[in-house]
Each structure stands twice: as C-alpha cells, then as structure tokens.
C-alpha cells in the first residue's frame, strides 16, 4: 500500500502511529492565513488557533503553514465571513453566532439557548447530522467548518446590580455575544449590545453597560470584569456548550492535496481538544480566585430561568415558522438532544449529583 492510499484510509494519526511519514516533502509549499475574531490576550480561545498552526507545520514538515492573526490585524473581528466569501483569506477562527444578522441558522453551529452541552455538540456534529446539515448551509458563504474547541457550559455573566426577579431584567443594557439569545433576552426587556470583549470593561465602568456575558471564570478574570460588576450569575442557559470553530474557505480547501487535507483535519482536532481541556483545568482555579476577591457568585432564580426558557422557545417557534431550513436543523438538534437527556439521566447526571454531595 502506498503512502497516499494509507493516509486516505487511516488519516494522519494512523500514519504517524504506523511510523510512516506523509509524502509532503515532494509537494509545493502551501501558505495560508487564518483571521481570528478574538484578541491574542485570550490565550484559551486564540491559543486554539496557535495550536492548530503549530500542528499543521509540524505534521507537514514545514511544507504547509497557517499564519494566525488576531482580531483587527487583517480585518475587524466580525469581518471574517465576508472575507471568506470573497476569497480574501483561507481560514478564520470565530464564533458562528456572531453572524446571525446574516441568517439565524449560524447560531446552531456555536450555541443556542437551552441547547447542547460540549460533549453533546461534538456528538451531534461529528456522528449525528449536525456538521453535514450546517456545512450544506455554509456552502452558500463559501466555507466549511471544523471545531476549534468548546468553552463548555458558560457562566451567566456580570451585573452591576442584583437580578432577583424577571422584572430586574427590564431595561438592562447588556453585552451579548450574539445569536438567538439576544432575541430571547429582548422579550424579557433586555437591551442587547453586541461588542468585542475588549471594549466591555470600559463600558461597564462608565455605566453605558449594566451587564455583560462572555465565557467563564478564566477569561472573565483576565478581562477584569469583577472590578466593575460585582454580581456573577450562573448558569449561562444560552450557552450550554459554545463551540468555537475554524471556518475554512471551500476553494482553498479543495486545492489542498489529500495529505494536507488530512493534516489540517488532524490539527483542528488537536486544537479543539486542547481548548476544552484548558477550560476544564483553568476555570475552577479562576473561580476560586474571583470568590476570594469578593465576587458575589449567585445562581439565577428559577423564575428567571423559566422566563428565559419560555422566551427562547417563542423565538425558535417564530424562526421555525419563517424558515424551513432553520426548522429542519432545529428539529434535528432537538431530536438528538432528547436522546442525550435520556442517556444523561443514567450517566453523568447521577454520578455528578452524588460526587457533589460528598467530600473527597
């Protein structure tokens, strides 16, 4: 069996395990650019793109390189989809729900209110219908997707004042990451603001924002939100597991050799696993520090969660009625989720409930 056939059948991981080096040295050098929607200071998220880049270079023996550029260096944070559509760049790292202004379907590729957890999202995309359905939709924007890593369940954000009832949300000016969550919160009276993470601290400090959600303890601590908004709520019901992604220009991808396609796929998987593992390791340490610094850590009242669920289901129903494509993807995701909830009742849920009830 020749190297090309072996790589096609087993992938890069299998080739390396077999001790057979890919035949990349005979190929012409490939140089790509990846524009991120995130600043370099977010070493968890932006770091995923750097891990991908290093892995591509290592696996290809330097014949395939992807240079990574933080938000603002090549283009604005939210300009990456337009750039991919116009073939300006080969690759981007972003959160799909930033682009729901183009089409609400984008949200399903990252996170939707009361949606999938990190592990469930991986199952739906890679072994359910998720990625197949979403990539068919994204083809009209000239890109395909690969996971860049999942944040896992996010926090409910930072607030300058307490949220005791649903009425406390009315008129609240809140930075929201994007997606269908903003529509649900609007039904509860929240005034949604979409801005890059780097602008949030100053807006909270000046009072032009009343609240902001971002990711979780590690990133939030780095951004200093606890200094300007003392109330930290959980859980982030709008992001049960936010999947960050690599958007890959279809024309550029189709020009790659089979070996380089396998290398890119393997590198994206390495980066995705690394990001999620980092969050699992770093968030508990950061949360303890935040609490030690007098952060007021509070669970959302059930009435607020219930109101959020009701508003979210109304948003989904409205989009289902307007778009058969939205409805098809939504219903497929919910069918997958129902099976996951059933399985969770017998697996992680009772195990975690027991572990949180004892001292170890």
Image (spheres, helix red, strand yellow):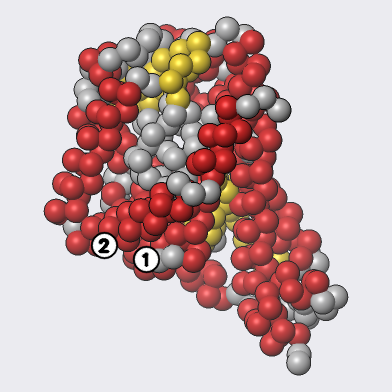
Residue identified by numbered label 1: 133
Marks 2 and 1 sit apart, C-alpha to C-alpha, by 9 Å
For image coordinates 50% across by 15% down, the residue present is 297
In the drawing, does residue 21 fall left or right of residue 79? right
For image coordinates 73% across by 69% down, the residue present is 13
Above or below, 257 against 300 in this view is: below
Q: Are marks 2 and 1 in contact (CB under 8 Å)?
A: yes
> Residue 343: x percent and y percent?
46, 53
Residue 303: name its quadrant: top left
In the drawing, does residue 224 fall left or right of residue 125? right
In the drawing, does residue 99 fall left or right of residue 265? left
Choose the circle earlier in sequence order: 2 or 1. 1
Q: Is residue 203 visible?
A: no
> Residue 7: x percent and y percent?
70, 80
> Residue 146: x percent and y percent?
53, 59
* Label 1: few (<14), some (14–19) or many (≥20) C-alpha neighbours in 10 Å: some
Locate the C terminus by quadrant.
top right
Residue identified by numbered label 2: 328
């Amino acid at each position: 069996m020749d190297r090309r056939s072996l790589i096609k059948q087993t992938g890069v991981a299998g080739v390396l395990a077999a001790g057979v080096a890919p035949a990349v040295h005979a190929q012409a050098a490939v140089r790509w650019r990846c524009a991120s929607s995130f600043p370099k200071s977010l070493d968890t998220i932006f770091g995923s793109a750097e891990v991908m880049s290093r892995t591509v270079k290592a696996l290809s023996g330097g014949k395939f390189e992807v240079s990574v550029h933080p938000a603002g260096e090549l283009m604005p944070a939210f300009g990456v989809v337009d750039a991919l559509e116009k073939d300006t760049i080969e690759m981007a790292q972003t959160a799909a729900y930033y682009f729901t202004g183009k089409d609400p379907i984008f949200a399903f590729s990252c996170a939707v209110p009361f949606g999938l957890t990190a592990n469930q999202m991986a199952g739906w995309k890679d072994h359910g219908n998720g990625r197949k359905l979403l990539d068919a939709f994204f083809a009209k924007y000239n890109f395909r997707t690969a996971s860049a890593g999942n944040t896992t369940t996010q926090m409910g954000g930072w607030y300058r004042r307490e949220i005791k009832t649903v009425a406390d949300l009315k008129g609240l000016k809140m930075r929201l990451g994007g997606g269908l969550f903003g529509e649900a919160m609007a039904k509860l009276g929240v005034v949604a603001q979409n801005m890059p993470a780097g602008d949030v601290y100053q807006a909270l400090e000046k009072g032009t924002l009343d609240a902001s959600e971002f990711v979780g303890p590690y990133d939030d601590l780095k951004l200093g939100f606890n200094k300007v908004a003392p109330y930290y709520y959980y859980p982030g019901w709008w992001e049960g597991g936010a999947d960050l992604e690599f958007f890959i220009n279809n024309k550029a991808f189709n020009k790659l050799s089979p070996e380089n396609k396998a290398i890119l796929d393997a590198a994206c998987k390495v980066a995705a696993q690394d990001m999620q593992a980092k969050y699992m390791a770093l968030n508990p340490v950061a949360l303890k520090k935040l609490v030690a610094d007098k952060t007021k850590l509070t669970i959302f009242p059930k009435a607020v969660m219930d109101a959020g669920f009701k508003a979210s289901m109304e948003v989904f129903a409205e989009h289902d009625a307007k778009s058969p494509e939205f409805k098809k993807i939504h219903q497929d995701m919910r069918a997958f989720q129902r099976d996951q909830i059933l399985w969770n009742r017998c697996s992680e849920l009772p195990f975690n409930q027991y572990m949180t009830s004892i001292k170890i």
